[in-house]
Image: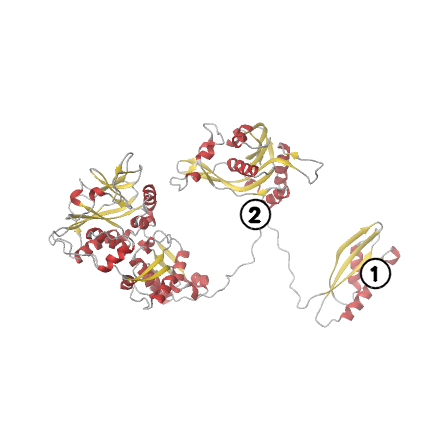
Amino acid sequence: MSLPLLRGYRPELPASSRAACEVLEDVGIEVKRHQDTPRGEVLTVELLANRGDHHCYLGLARELGGRFEAPTPLPPLAPLTAADGPAPLVTTDTCLAFGVARVDLADADPARLPEAWAEALELNGEHTGLLAVDAGNVTGRELGQPVHVYDADLLSGPLRVRLSEEGESVVLLDSAEPVALPAGLTVVADDEGVVAVAGVIGARRAAVTETTRALLVESALFDPAAVRRAARALARQTAAATRFERGADPTLVDAGAARTVALLDAWGALAADGPRTWSRTVLPADARLAPREIPLDLDSLDTYYAVDFDPAAVERRLTCLGFAVRKADGTDAADGGRTLLVGVPGHRLWDVFNPECLYEEIGRMWSFDSFPAVLPEAGGGAAPTPRQRARAALEQVLVGYGFFEVITDGFYSRTAHERLGVPAGSPLNRHVELRNAIDRNFSLLKNNALLQALDVADYNQRHSLTLGKYFEFTHLFEAVDADSHRELPLLWGMLWGEETYGSWQRGGQGFDFWYVKGVLEELAHACGTRFEFRRTADDPSPLAELMHPTRSVHLYADGRRVGLCGEVHPSVTANWKLRTDRVLYFEVDWTALLTERAPQSAEQVDELPEHPLLRRDVAFHLPAGLTAGEVRTAMEAVSPLELAWVRVTDLYESGEVRAHTFELAFQNDNTVTADQVNHAMGALTSHVLTTFGERGVYQR
């Protein structure tokens, strides 16, 4: 980007280039490189991945305007009149807005692109030498609204936006040969075929040339996902695609065309008596583009940053970023109102949804470095929920049995799923599928855990391990119909190989159904419930067809089927070529084991004393028939010093010796001396021996 051009939109920038770069960095625009070139100062900046509005000079100027509290108005726009005749036809919901302006270029073309803009376009490889094309590129770089220009005399019939059909091809602007288009891409076409891949690149057939006189200027808004899909299908990441993929500004559709016409007019490129019309297609409203307001609680904002913000300053800076700010009751925010309603502008509809988004905007405008470094307030915590207690109990049992926890992906490919050999018609063949997966290896949300459990076994056996015991808490996704699904919590575990017990003489022991049954019974017991094991079920698990028919059962809890366990069918394990006779597997909806126990009331905690307690130990042999409680009571009754407690801390038994160690803690007001404590211990010891000596008590 050209720093002199940016200064033209934001004259408040510091005169020092270094200081200007620091301001850009502080508002979140990372400057990767600053160069002094024959064309002037050039900055290479790295933009945020989700901010399409940053990909233009006006967008960066607006970000800086929030810091400087300076508004950023639109540049001059040309007045356009309504066109006669029907508007372009749109037949796909991947087009959110579409319009075309019609102008005539002057026969004699004395106009030329201003040198500053020619150099700015050269920086990104966008200078074509064709004034009408360059005007559209300037509009994109200036406003952030991509526009495309056509030679109207080369079009056949009106423009229409539709989806590409199977077998269609087009010669793109950057190709000499036809390029095959996948079916379902959003395209702009006339009666003869495709003239542009919407939001990505135009076609040669209607391209502007030096002889073009009738010009159509297209300004539109396309669905970001549709543009991303088209750009990847064609392997072309154009400037227009980069902006549309991140969500363009619906309020700039009209302005994009009007600005392009205004530039051509200012450069003397338009015929004086030619048309200057605009025709926009009326499309159904898209919920993503609906105006919305976000409540901003200034007290919460102050707490978030540990700073007392001036409401008027917050309003000014958000307004300069393009947000519409008003007090919740409709009065001026400067009068001390503590809740603001913040209207989201068009260029932020795609990424601002909640108050936390506004916190970030305010933080950047004030500079994050300006806020104090303080820890947030935190409460004392809460008792574990029944869900947390159950999961901890299950983990403790499994780890005690030697299981290792694993983490698997939530997706797999259709090819991987076919490895299970699921019978035709099985519910396991129905999946929740990603319609636009980047990687087809992760296109299906998993509806079973057995596939990935066997993958773990295969991986470990290929690394020469002879024993596998592992588990996972995960979720399955069950397709209900074409548009909905259920998410199911699951605990699964798998065992294979032989378990040894630390002795070379004993050898190993393989796992079987009864081992798994014992593990599951202990899991249920740890949660305060029990499983019922049934060979048959009225509503069998879809996974039952992949288990051994006589070595597997269903699990029931409170009369409801919650899982199954047993040996995986040998025909299934054969697909993984596992080197083990048996593979044992279980899965259970572990949330069925939750028991609603009331949280235990916290014990009353005594306040810490001002001075530490004075502690001493004494041990006595106590014969059978004499309890430690009797001895403790005797010492408490005659202690010369006030006791905080007397506790038994150890019991030693060997033969006829039965020694109890008592800990005595004396209160301390910082006046008790060591001699007093020693005297008290002597008195207590003598009293115990005198009282219980005849019963066989002696000091150890």
Dot 2 surroundings within 10 Å: few (below 14), some, or many (20 or more)?
A: few
Structure colour scheme: secondary structure
Q: Which residue lies furthest to the bottom in this view?
A: 671
Left or right of residue 381, residue 271 in this image: left
| Contact? badges 2 and 1 (CB < 8 Å) | no
The kind of residue on which mark 1 rests is Val
Helix, strand or loop for disc 1: helix
Judge from the rendering whether residue 134 lies leftward or rightward of residue 592; answer left or right.
Answer: left
Residue closest to the far left = 273
Mark number, residue 153:
none
Question: Counting residues from the N terminus, which is met first, the one under dot 2 or under dot 1?
Answer: 2
Instruction: Name the one closer to the observer, 362 or 205.
Output: 205
Amino acid type, residue under disc 2 in the picture: Gln
Check the picture and name the quadrant holding the C terminus: bottom right
Q: Whole-percent x and y of residue 674?
A: 76, 70
In front of the other: 616 or 632: 616
Residue 273 in picture, x, y percent from top left: 10, 53
Percent coordinates x, y for residue 544 in the rendering: 53, 30
Quadrant of res 495: top right
Alpha-carbon span between mark 2 and mark 1: 49 Å
Image check: 35 left or right of 300? left
**From this viewpoint, is residue 328 visible?**
no
Res 688 → quadrant: bottom right
Residue 113 visible (yes or no): yes
Choose between 653 and 696: the one closer to the eye. 653
Per the image, label 2 sits on a secondary structure element best described as: helix
The residue wearing badge 2 is 388
Of the 4 image quadrants, the one containing the N terminus is bottom left
Residue named by callout 1: 688
Residue farthest front in this picture: 38
Q: Please count the marks in the image.
A: 2
In the rendered image, the vertical position of residue 105 relative to residue 4, given as above or below: above
